[in-house]
Image: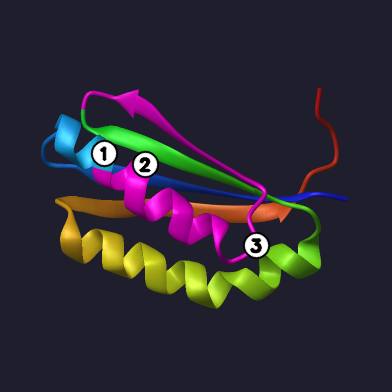
Amino acid sequence: MTYSTVSNWDVTEWTDEMEAIARDKFVPMIMSVGAERVQMVRTGDLSFCVITEYADAKTGESAQSRIAEIRGQAAQELPMTMASASAGAVFANG
């Protein structure tokens, strides 16, 4: 059974440079700890979510300490704050 995490973020500004940093730096960092897929979805003018998928719960759960470090680094480098995070086993998809 696959495992996913979702984190919701608020930013104080939105720029093409920030998108490039997310795409070129942070997505590869997340992938390097075992993620199979990472999606960063703009959910508002100054908000987005990160949806990360892992092959199974063991892989996803074992990555979470490193993911916390990556989230902290992102919040230090970019004008953003994490609003919430959740995680769990995927029980249905299409």
Q: Which residue is mark 2?
A: 23
The answer to whether the residue labelled 2 contacts the one labelled 1, judged by CB atoms less than 8 Å apart, is yes
Residue at image position (67%, 75%) is 62
Q: Which mark is residue 50?
A: none
| 92, 55: nearer the viewer | 55
Q: Which mark is residue 20?
A: 1
Image vertical order of residue 81 relative to residue 73, above or below: above
- Indicate the position of residue 91 as horizontal and vertical percent values: 85, 41
| 11, 67: nearer the viewer | 67
- Indicate the position of residue 78 as horizontal and vertical percent values: 17, 54
Looking at the image, residue 60 sits to the left or right of residue 76; the answer is right
Colour approach in the figure: rainbow
Q: Secondary structure at mark 1?
A: helix
Three-letter amino acid code at the position of disc 1: Ala
Q: Earlier in the sequence, mark 3 or mark 2?
A: 2
- Indicate the position of residue 67 as horizontal and vertical percent values: 49, 67
Q: Which mark is residue 34?
A: 3
Residue 12 lies in the magenta stretch:
no
Residue at image position (81%, 22%) is 94
What stretch of residues is rendered in magenta?
Answer: 21-45
Q: Earlier in the sequence, mark 1 or mark 3?
A: 1
